[in-house]
Image (cartoon, rainbow, N blue to C red):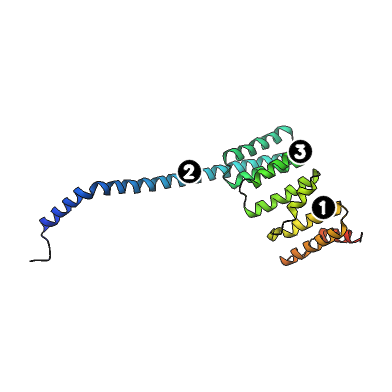
């Protein structure tokens, strides 16, 4: 008997297989196509959202530049509105954190430290990148210290995992200790800041050396 089926037998087998499996195969194909189209639609939507956030942020930067060139209440209010719009409509993007950061900076310029603190805490609660989080903590520490919230401020600058920003945290800690007339503590902090800068194969800034000299003069 031949090992090969006749053409008619092969056709008949195919018909029978299709009767038994055709529907499930079509469903599987339909589901797979739906998943592919859904994924592409989601990707397109995400990209459109990113593009819109980027455009809105660029407009915000332009508005901020206008304020810095010729500040007035209307321009400042416009910046505030645009930043809030970015925060509300694109909170999942990094641009929203930059918007809040800009609002905090403007609030500091207006001596509205409570609003500055609120905006900086918003950034910290909105999943910032590691670098953005560290810079925000530094700014927040300064704002808290200016509000006489020294304990909270010192807690922020006392972290030991600041990475490449360690020198900035140590320098700010030294500034706080000088303000409290703890000059030995300030010397220790400034010296550690200098070593942290050198560890980055950088030259310590002249201002840091001046602060260290000043703190040492009281010992």
Q: On the picture, is 48 further left or further right than 2?
A: right
Which sits earlier in the primary sequence, circle 2 or circle 3? 2
Name which residue lies at 17% across and 53% down.
14
Q: Residue furthest left?
A: 1
- Local packing at callout 3 (Cα closer than 10 Å; few below 14, some 14-19, many 20+) is some
Which sits earlier in the primary sequence, circle 3 or circle 1? 3
Name which residue lies at 13% across and 53% down.
12
Q: Which mark is residue 190?
A: none
Residue 61 visible in this rendered orientation of the protein: no
* Residue corresponding to mark 1: 176
- Local packing at callout 2 (Cα closer than 10 Å; few below 14, some 14-19, many 20+) is few
* Image depth: mark 2 or mark 3 in front: 3
The x and y percentages for residue 4 are: 12, 64
Q: Quick one: quadrant of the N terminus? A: bottom left
* Residue corresponding to mark 3: 112
**Whether label 2 touches label 3, CB < 8 Å:** no
* Residue corresponding to mark 2: 45
Quarter of the rendering containing residue 83? top right
The x and y percentages for residue 205 are: 79, 61
The x and y percentages for residue 43 are: 46, 47
Cα distance in 3D space between marks 2 and 3:
38 Å
Cα distance in 3D space between marks 3 and 1:
21 Å
């Amino acid at each position: 008997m031949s090992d090969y089926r006749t053409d008619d037998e092969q056709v008949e087998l195919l018909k029978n297989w299709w009767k038994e499996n055709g529907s499930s195969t079509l469903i599987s194909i339909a589901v797979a196509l739906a998943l592919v189209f859904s994924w592409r639609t989601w990707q397109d939507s995400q990209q459109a959202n990113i593009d819109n956030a980027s455009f809105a942020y660029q407009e915000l930067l332009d508005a901020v530049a206008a304020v810095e060139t010729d500040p007035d209440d209307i321009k400042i209010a416009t910046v505030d509105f645009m930043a809030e719009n970015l925060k509300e409509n694109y909170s999942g993007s990094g641009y929203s954190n930059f918007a809040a950061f800009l609002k905090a900076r403007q609030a500091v310029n207006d001596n509205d430290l409570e609003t500055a603190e609120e905006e900086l805490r918003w950034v910290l609660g909105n999943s910032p990148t590691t670098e953005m989080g560290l810079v925000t903590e530094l700014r927040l520490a300064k704002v808290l210290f200016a509000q006489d919230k020294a304990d909270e401020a010192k807690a922020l600058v006392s972290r030991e995992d600041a990475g490449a920003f360690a020198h900035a945290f140590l320098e700010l800690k030294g500034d706080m200790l000088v303000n409290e007339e703890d000059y030995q503590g300030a010397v220790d902090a400034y010296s550690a800041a200098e070593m942290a800068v050198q560890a980055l194969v950088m030259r310590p800034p002249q201002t840091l050396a001046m602060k260290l000299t000043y703190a040492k003069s009281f010992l």
